[in-house]
Image (spheres, rainbow, N blue to C red):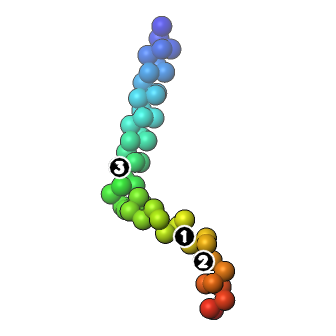
Amino acid sequence: MGIIFLLIGCSALVAILFLGAFFWANKTGQHQDTDTPAYRILFDDELEENH
C-alpha cells in the first residue's frame, strides 16, 4: 500500500514539473508564432540562392 502513495506522489511531482514548463514556455513566447516554421521549409531554396 505504501508504494501506491509513493507512485501518486511521484506522478504529482512530474505533473507539476510539466505544468511549470508549459507556463514558462508561454511566458517566454514559445507559442506565439506557429505559422512561420511551416512556411519556412517551402521557401528554403529561395533563401539560399540570395546569399
Q: Is residue 46 above or below residue 34?
A: below
Residue, x 61% and y 84% (percent of image)?
A: 47
Secondary element under disc 2, as helix, strand or loop, is: loop
Tell me: 1 left or right of 22. right
Towards the viewer: 16 or 44? 44
Towards the viewer: 42 or 25? 42
Report if the CB atoms under discs 2 and 1 are less than 8 Å apart: yes
> CA gap, disc 2 to disc 1?
7 Å
Q: Position of residue 46 (x, y in %)?
A: 63, 84
Q: Earlier in the sequence, mark 1 or mark 3?
A: 3
Q: Position of residue 34 (x, y in %)?
A: 45, 62
Which residue has dot 1 on it?
A: 39
**Which numbered dot is residue 11?**
none
Residue, x 37% and y 45% (percent of image)?
A: 20
Q: Position of residue 39 (x, y in %)?
A: 54, 70
> CA gap, disc 2 to disc 3?
32 Å
Identity of the residue furthest to the bottom in this view: 51
Which residue has dot 2 on it?
A: 43
Q: Amino acid at mark 3?
A: Phe
Q: Amino acid at mark 1?
A: Tyr
**Which numbered dot is residue 23?**
3
Residue, x 66% and y 89% (percent of image)?
A: 49
